[in-house]
Image (cartoon, rainbow, N blue to C red):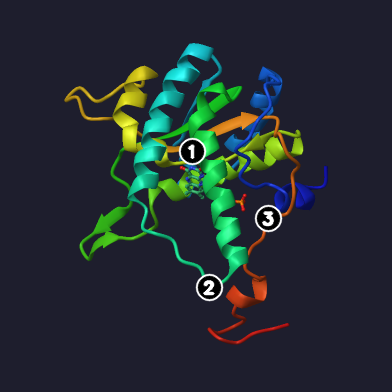
């Protein structure tokens, strides 16, 4: 499909059919992920692709606990109009559904990043060149867009980080000799065929958030 169409219709998919996802398709998405840019071309990410039903179920149980704890801690949402309230409830219900069924999604892809010092320093001090995860999320999005082009749904999720230690241990991810983790989870992406249709998700208008040449200067 056309690249712009794939980009415009890549959105969070949280309800999946049981149809399996082929290794070939997963490999295509991983190759697309590997083509993403990274600072200094360090390519810091590792992928753990979980398709084994028992391992998926175990990751799913941890995700479920993490999500429900997170949802309980969210502040009460308030809205100025009904449309926003309905949209919020729809996202919450879909998020709950994913949390309660993550272990049944055909493939779970974990994007790991090493915990390493990042940046540079000289006699003037530390230089802020951006965070290491800025070199991982482009790969995550490439993966999701490639999946969309193949008719596969995905959602970039991060609440699993609440149970990082358990997940990393479950997957046999090595830690440092002193026992501290060597990796953190940048994202957990469920992959499967969507139950609904792909579509263009509502967003703020580009004009509302774009400034030309200087802050506040707008073009139609
Ligand atoms: C950094 C990040 C973390 C996210 N974490 C979660 C998550 O843990 N669980 C979840 O269901 N969705 C998660 N999402 C998905 C967002 O809720 C979703 O992208 C947003 O609501 C827009 O959805 P839409 O593209 O379908 O409109 C995350 C998205 C991002 C970018």
Q: Are marks 2 and 1 in contact (CB under 8 Å)?
A: no
Direction from residue 36 to residue 176 in the image, left or right: left
The alpha-carbon separation of the residues under discs 2 and 1 comes to 43 Å
Which is closer to the viewer, label 3 or label 1?
3
Direction from residue 58 to residue 95 in the image, left or right: right
Q: Say what secondary structure mark 1 lies in.
A: loop
Direction from residue 88 to residue 25 in the image, left or right: right
- Name the residue beneath numbered marker 1: 43
Which is closer to the viewer, label 2 or label 1?
2
Q: Are marks 3 and 1 in contact (CB under 8 Å)?
A: no
- Name the residue beneath numbered marker 3: 201
Badge 2 density bin: few <14, some 14–19, many ≥20, Cα 10 Å:
few
Q: Residue furthest front?
A: 82
Corner quadrant of residue 86 = bottom right
Q: Earlier in the sequence, mark 3 or mark 1?
A: 1
Q: Say what secondary structure mark 3 lies in.
A: loop
Image location (x, y in percent) of residue 94: 57, 42
Image location (x, y in percent) of residue 15: 63, 35
Viewer-nearest residue: 215 or 18: 18
């Amino acid at each position: 499909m056309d690249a712009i169409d794939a980009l415009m219709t890549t959105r969070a998919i949280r309800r999946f059919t049981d149809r399996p996802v082929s290794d070939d398709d997963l490999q295509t998405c991983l190759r697309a992920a590997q083509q993403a840019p990274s600072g200094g071309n360090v390519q810091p990410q590792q992928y753990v692709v979980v398709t084994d039903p028992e391992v998926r179920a175990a990751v799913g149980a941890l995700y479920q606990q993490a999500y429900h704890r997170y949802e309980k801690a969210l502040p009460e949402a308030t809205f100025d109009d009904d449309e926003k309230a309905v949209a919020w409830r729809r996202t919450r219900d879909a998020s709950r559904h994913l949390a309660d069924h993550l272990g049944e999604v055909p493939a779970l892809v974990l994007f790991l990043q090493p915990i390493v010092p990042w940046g540079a320093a000289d006699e003037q001090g530390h230089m802020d060149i951006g965070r290491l995860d800025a070199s991982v999320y482009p790969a995550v999005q490439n993966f999701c867009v490639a999946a969309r082009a193949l008719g596969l749904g995905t959602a970039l999720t991060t609440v699993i980080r609440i149970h990082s230690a358990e997940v990393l241990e479950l997957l046999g991810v090595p830690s440092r000799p002193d026992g501290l983790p060597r990796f953190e989870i940048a994202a957990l992406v469920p992959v499967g065929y969507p139950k609904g249709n792909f579509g263009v998700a509502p967003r703020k208008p580009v004009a509302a958030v774009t400034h030309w040449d200087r802050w506040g200067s707008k073009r139609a």
